[in-house]
Amino acid sequence: MSYRSRLRPLIAAGFVPLVAASLALSGCSNAKDEAAPSFKGQGSGMTTVDNADKEEKSGEETTAAQETATKDEETPEEPPVVTVTQTEKQELPSSSGGGQKSGVGNYISNFNEYGWLDGGYADCQRFERALFAGSGPDGRVIICETGGGVKFYRSSMFDGQFQTDDVTQDGNNYYVNADPSIIVVTPSGVSVREGGGLAATGEFTESWQR
């Protein structure tokens, strides 16, 4: 008997449609299994999201932002730097005896080549001209010269007055004989020497000589 002869009774009995239906269902099942995505391993075609990683990263970012804000609040602003330059005060050298002037026309205050303008005992007389003049807290001294070359010393110092023509000049200094004393007159002041010692001194705040 041939193969077709054998199938005829089965087809007639409805067996073939059942087999066909079973084969069709089996094919659908295989097709569904092949199309269904796999969630295991790589190459599944879907990306999985790990929520725990996201929360951890978000927490780290929040903590970093809070630490930055805290540092900004805790770090005080530095005040501006002010540079102060201090110049050391230098004292001017003091000239002994104060202002010392010389020459005609370069006079001390209230004075000309003939003496003080307000007069007084220590002043030049008629036909005399001033060679030297000095004044200070203790009084005034003037040395005048006549046309004949005679020199006179006049002073109103130490609560007294004195005059003599026994005067010797040595450069800018004058030595006056006032026995038993010697009066030494310099541009810075006057000193009185007696018995080998110093009896009195007077300072000039200003002086002038020809």
Image: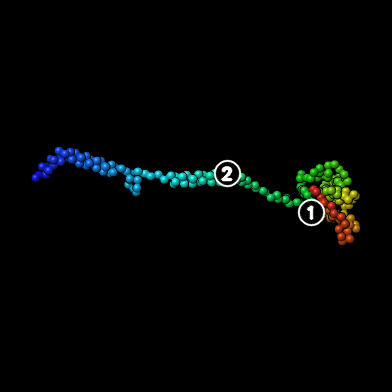
Q: On the rendered structure, is 120 left or right of 66?
A: right
Secondary structure of residue under mark 1: loop
Q: Residue at x 89, y 52 (%)?
A: 164
Image location of residue 168, percent across then percent down = 84, 55
Q: Residue at x 50, y 44 (%)?
A: 62
CA separation in Å, label 1 and label 2: 79 Å
Residue 117 visible in the snapshot: yes
Residue 20 visible in the snapshot: no
Q: Amino acid at mark 2?
A: Glu
Where, by quadrant of the figure, is residue 38 drawn? top left
Disc nearest the viewer among 1 and 2: 2
Secondary structure of residue under mark 2: helix
Q: Amino acid at mark 1?
A: Asn
Colour scheme in the image? rainbow
Image location of residue 58, percent across then percent down = 47, 44
User: Considering only vertical position in the picture, is 168 above or below 104?
Assistant: below
Viewer-nearest residue: 92 or 122: 92
Q: Which mark is residue 172?
A: 1
Viewer-nearest residue: 94 or 192: 94
Image location of residue 15, percent across then percent down = 18, 40
Q: What residue is pinned by disc 2?
A: 73
Q: Residue at x 72, y 50 (%)?
A: 91
Crowding around mark 1 (Cα neighbors within 10 Å: few <14, some 14 to 19, many 20+) is: few
